[in-house]
Image (tube, rainbow, N blue to C red):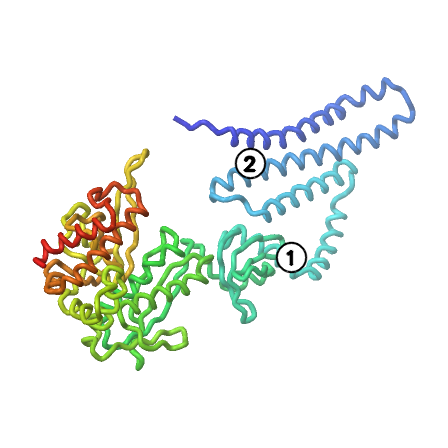
């Protein structure tokens, strides 16, 4: 069953029909005067009416041709350009086509008025205008080239209004968005909000890169050089996670995911290329925020020692990093110390924890935790990206909420120490490296350290209390108690788990 046209579309159709109907009505009235005018004037019998009749006849004849021209122009504009052209190409017709079609229609109308109404011989006039046209054409050669080049641009549709383009004129590169294609020039708005006016003939004679075709994004390459000692698997994991973390801030939904490739091996190390796909409007900030994410992820992995002040980043690893295959113990202990749960641990405790806790590699799309599963381990994300999934219930039904988890985040710490279950389902967004702290590892650390167990219990109670105050979730209702009572409860659970 065909859909009924909306009220808005009906009003537009009515408006366009009125624009055609009004000149048709005027033309019909003038035609009636022309047809019946002779009999009416004879009945008046005034001698002066003869001259008036001739003048009135000219007026009616000129008006009739102009009305026909108006009708044709509006039919071409509303039916051919605004309807058929827009339906065929999926966009409005360029203004230049409308201007050129109107020019030729009115030119033909004026020629017909001279030949029919005033009964002048057009042969002489056309011959004279032809000779004059040659002279004018030679004088206005550049202008004519611009006009026909603009017409070709509109017909070929290689670029159109709204496209983001790049071209080179006189050794100057121009990047911007096409704002207007007129008779003679094309206006391009650059990224710095300056308008560049380019003659159409010049534009049609150079190579143009159209960033809007076939998809509205471009490929930006970012070089990063890492030390030879870092395995390519680890380098790709870190760079891929960093680029993916921020790609949603500048990429369209249909853009490819960031990719990592090796470009060359030079004396400085292995040169990687991080390829991102921003839109033209966001290309300026895309590199900036991606480089920031890369530096942050490399810092979490403990790979930054020196930074060259150029576009290329040179990275070196510490001597004790086991040839760069994994984070060195010093960096891992530093990362653990930044977690609020382990703030009270001494440096010796942190280093011991790094030795006891195994590092676990996880491939992309592999689940780390499942909501409702008994929490027997906590995980510290060292490298890569994770994705958490939670279900929010509302009047409209269930809504799945996803959130990206960055390096340095501890997962399942409080629920493990409370002897509870995981609250979120978490899987790897990219290949990731996790530091797994299970009950056996924590038990080995807390044995004969009741003081540390008390401090840890206070930290857990404080974290849970803050979370309860910030959210109104009904999950884990058994832990909605005062901080002091919760501290006692956590310590009892630690005693039970680790035989303190």
The answer to whether residue 46 is above or below residue 138 is above
In whole angstroms, how far apart are the C-alphas of marks 2 and 1?
A: 28 Å
In this view, the residue farthest toward the bottom is 267
Numbered mark located on residue 270 in the image = none
Q: Can residue 471 be seen in the rendering of this structure? A: yes
Q: Nearer the viewer, residue 280 or 336?
A: 336
The mark total stands at: 2
Task: Work out whether mark 2 precedes mark 1 in sequence or the reverse, and give the earlier one.
Answer: 2
In this view, the residue farthest toward the left is 499
Q: Nearer the viewer, residue 234 or 353?
A: 353
Residue at image location 73% in from the left, 23% down from the top: 32
Q: Which percent across, then down, holds residue 448?
A: 10, 65
Q: Secondary structure at mark 1?
A: helix
Q: Is residue 210 left or right of residue 38?
A: left
Residue at image location 49% in from the left, 62% down from the top: 166
Report which quarter residue 250 is drawn in: bottom left
The residue at which mark 2 appears reads as 79
The residue at which mark 1 appears reads as 144
Q: Is residue 306 left or right of residue 490?
A: right
Quarter of the picture containing the C terminus is bottom left
How many residues crowd mark 2 within 10 Å: few (<14), some (14–19), many (20+)? some
Report which quarter residue 435 is drawn in: bottom left
């Amino acid at each position: 069953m065909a859909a009924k046209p909306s009220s808005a579309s009906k009003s537009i159709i009515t408006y366009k029909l009125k624009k055609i109907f009004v000149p048709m009505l005027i033309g019909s009235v003038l035609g009636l005067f022309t047809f019946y005018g002779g009999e009416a004037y004879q009945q008046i019998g005034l001698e002066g009416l003869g001259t008036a009749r001739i003048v009135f006849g000219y007026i009616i004849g000129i008006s009739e041709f102009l009305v026909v021209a108006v009708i044709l122009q509006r039919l071409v504009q509303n039916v051919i350009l605004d309807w058929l052209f827009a339906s065929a190409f999926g966009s409005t017709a360029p203004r230049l086509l409308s201007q050129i079609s109107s020019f030729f229609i009115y030119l033909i109308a004026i020629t017909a008025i001279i030949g029919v109404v005033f009964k002048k011989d057009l042969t002489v006039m056309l011959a004279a205008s032809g000779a004059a046209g040659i002279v004018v054409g030679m004088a206005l050669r550049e202008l004519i080239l611009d006009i026909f080049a603009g017409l070709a641009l509109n017909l070929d549709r290689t670029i159109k209004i709204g496209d983001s383009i790049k071209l080179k004129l006189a050794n100057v590169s121009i990047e911007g968005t096409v704002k207007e294609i007129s008779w003679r020039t094309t206006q391009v708005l650059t990224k710095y909000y300056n308008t560049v006016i380019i003659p159409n003939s010049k534009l049609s004679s150079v190579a143009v890169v159209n960033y809007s075709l076939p998809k509205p994004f471009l490929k930006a390459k970012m070089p990063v050089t890492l030390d030879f000692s870092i395995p390519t698997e680890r380098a790709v994991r870190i760079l891929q996670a960093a680029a993916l973390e921020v790609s949603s801030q500048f990429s369209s939904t249909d853009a490819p995911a960031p990719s990592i490739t090796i470009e060359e091996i030079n004396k400085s190390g292995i040169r990687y290329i991080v390829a991102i796909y921003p839109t033209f409007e966001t290309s300026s900030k895309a590199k900036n925020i991606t480089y920031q994410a890369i530096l942050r992820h490399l810092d979490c992995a403990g790979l930054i020692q020196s930074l060259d002040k150029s576009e290329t980043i040179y990275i070196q690893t510490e001597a004790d990093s086991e040839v760069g295959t994994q984070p060195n113990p010093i960096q891992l202990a530093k990362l653990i110390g930044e977690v609020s749960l382990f703030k009270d641990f001494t440096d010796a405790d942190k280093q011991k924890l790094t030795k006891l806790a195994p590092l676990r590699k996880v491939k992309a799309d592999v689940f780390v935790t499942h909501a409702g599963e008994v929490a027997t381990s906590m995980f510290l994300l060292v490298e890569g990206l994770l994705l958490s999934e939670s279900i929010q219930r509302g009047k409209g039904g269930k809504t799945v909420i996803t959130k990206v988890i960055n390096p340095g985040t501890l997962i399942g710490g409080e629920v493990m120490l409370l002897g509870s279950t995981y609250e979120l389902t978490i899987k790897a967004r990219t290949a990731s490296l996790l530091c797994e702290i299970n009950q056996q590892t924590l038990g080995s650390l807390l044995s004969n350290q009741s003081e540390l167990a008390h401090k840890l219990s206070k930290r857990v109670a404080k974290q849970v209390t803050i979370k309860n105050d910030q959210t109104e979730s009904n999950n884990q209702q058994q832990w909605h108690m005062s901080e002091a009572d919760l501290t006692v409860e956590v310590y009892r659970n630690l005693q039970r788990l680790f035989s303190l």
